[in-house]
Amino acid sequence: MAITRWQPFQEIETWDPFHWEPMREVESLQRQMNRLFDRLLPSTNGESNRIAFIPAAEIEETADRLILKLEVPGLKAKDIDIKVTEQSVSIAGEKKSEAKTEDKGIMRSEFRYGKFERVINLPVHIQSDKVKAEYKDGVLHLDLPKVEQEKRKTVTVEVA
């Protein structure tokens, strides 16, 4: 009788964590995240065509309208570009840096300068031709009236 060495895992393939299917999905997600951060964060070489920041937003819904507020301090009203459809609002602009002179040296600046853009999908359809905007104290206020059929109506339901 011949003696053979027992190898219990001989027929099982070696698991390589870097070559299994979900790993490719992780690599794809990583590439997408890298592209997103490349787009959002300002570059070190001073390119100004990148998005510098994303303004914070707040939406309030009433019976007949949406009220959208967006924090965009340090801009003038003429520097804000607003585009509205029935389903979304796009707000873009650019916060330009102040000219620095040799005699005024800045040691540290945490201000954000550059372009921004924010597209907000709306939960209801609005009357895009009746939108009103006001810019005051660094906050953009948009009054977005709902389309007539989107207004919430109270209906009494009879129980049988």
Image (cartoon, grey):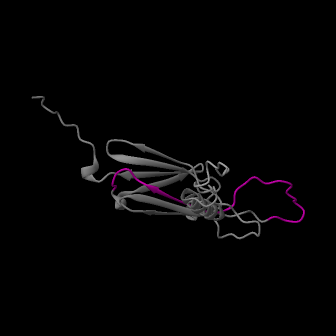
Residue drawn at point x = 69 percent, y = 60 percent? 113
Residue 5 colored in magenta in the image: no
The x and y percentages for residue 5 are: 68, 50
Q: How many marks?
A: 0
Secondary structure that dominates the magenta span: loop
* Foreground of the two, 80 or 86: 86
The x and y percentages for residue 86 are: 35, 59
Quarter of the image that includes the C terminus: top left
Residue drawn at point x = 22 percent, y = 37 percent? 154
Task: In the displayed orientation, state which residue is furthest to the right.
Answer: 103
Which quadrant would residue 61 be assigned to in this image?
top left
Task: In the displayed orientation, state which residue is furthest to the top.
Answer: 159
Task: In the displayed orientation, state which residue is furthest to the left.
Answer: 160
The x and y percentages for residue 4 are: 66, 51
The residue range painted magenta reads 100-126
The x and y percentages for residue 51 are: 63, 63
Residue 159 to residue 143: above or below: above
* Foreground of the two, 16 or 4: 4
Which quadrant would residue 106 be assigned to in this image?
bottom right
117 on left or right of 159: right
Residue 106 colored in magenta in the image: yes
29 on left or right of 59: right
Residue drawn at point x = 62 percent, y = 58 percent? 75
